[in-house]
Image: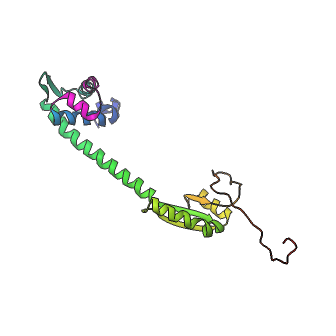
């Protein structure tokens, strides 16, 4: 670091580099040779595209386009910036694809905790329905009493829990998804019969 560098404030990259939308617009101008067609391609008006290119030129300190009634042509600096922009946009597309893959992988795993009665009688049907809707979802099931289900949710061991009863443990949210009907069964000789 030189003596001058110590006194120069650091300007964040976001203030020195055009945003992805501007770079995509520049690439569209290079493809179409026209600011109007490029604007339509990226879904903005021609005046907005013109303003965005002028703003990018001011930010970078170079002229990117030669404008004429016949269209827009990249300057030598514009051609160089376009090559760099292509690499940045490709990297952003790879970043987006990677994060989508992470979301897909996260969404394809479901850790369920359920009380014994629900796990035995209700969950099998629900899991069959889930398999029909989202066949790639891998489900793991943890069975225990209601307190164990709540504990697993609080500690992050489970993503979703099912318990009987109306009380919701502190720190958790819940909703009623079904009502149970209980029937007493007795022998014909019992006094309640």
Quadrant (top left, top right, bottom left, bottom right) of the N terminus: top left
What span is colored magenta in the figure? 33-51
Quadrant (top left, top right, bottom left, bottom right) of the C terminus: bottom right
The answer to whether 61 is drawn above or below residue 100 in the figure is above
From the top left corner, tell me how far across and down residue 8 is, in percent.
Answer: 32, 29
Whether the magenta-drawn stretch holds residue 37 is answered as yes
Q: Is residue 39 visible?
A: yes
Taking the spot 41% from the left edge, 53% from the top edge, the residue there is: 103
The answer to whether 160 is drawn above or below residue 37 in the figure is below
Q: Is residue 17 visible?
A: no
From the top left corner, tell me how far across and down residue 129 is, in percent.
Answer: 51, 62
Taking the spot 65% from the left edge, 51% from the top edge, the residue there is: 171
Task: Tell me if 86 is positioned left or right of 182 in this view.
Answer: left
Task: Please name whichever residue, 133 or 45, is drawn nearer the observer in this view of the structure.
Answer: 133
From the top left corner, tell me how far across and down residue 130 is, in percent.
Answer: 49, 61
Task: Please name whichever residue, 92 or 14, is drawn nearer the observer in this view of the structure.
Answer: 92
């Amino acid at each position: 670091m030189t003596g001058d560098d110590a006194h120069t404030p650091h300007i964040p990259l976001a203030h020195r580099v055009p945003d992805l939308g501007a770079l995509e617009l520049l690439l569209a101008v290079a493809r179409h040779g026209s600011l109007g067609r490029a604007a339509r391609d990226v879904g903005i008006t021609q005046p907005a595209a013109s303003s965005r290119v002028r703003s990018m030129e001011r930010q970078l300190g170079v002229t990117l386009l030669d404008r004429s009634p016949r269209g827009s042509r990249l300057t030598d600096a514009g051609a160089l910036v376009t090559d760099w922009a292509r690499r940045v946009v490709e990297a952003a597309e790879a970043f987006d694809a990677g994060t989508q893959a992470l979301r897909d992988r996260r969404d394809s795993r479901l850790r369920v905790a359920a009380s014994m009665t629900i796990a035995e009688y209700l969950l099998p049907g629900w899991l069959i329905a889930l398999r029909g809707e989202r066949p790639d979802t891998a489900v793991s099931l943890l069975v225990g009493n209601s307190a164990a289900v709540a504990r697993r949710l609080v500690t992050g061991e489970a993503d979703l829990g099912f318990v009987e009863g109306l009380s919701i443990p502190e720190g958790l949210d819940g909703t009623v998804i079904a009502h149970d009907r209980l029937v007493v069964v007795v022998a014909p000789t019992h006094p309640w019969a």
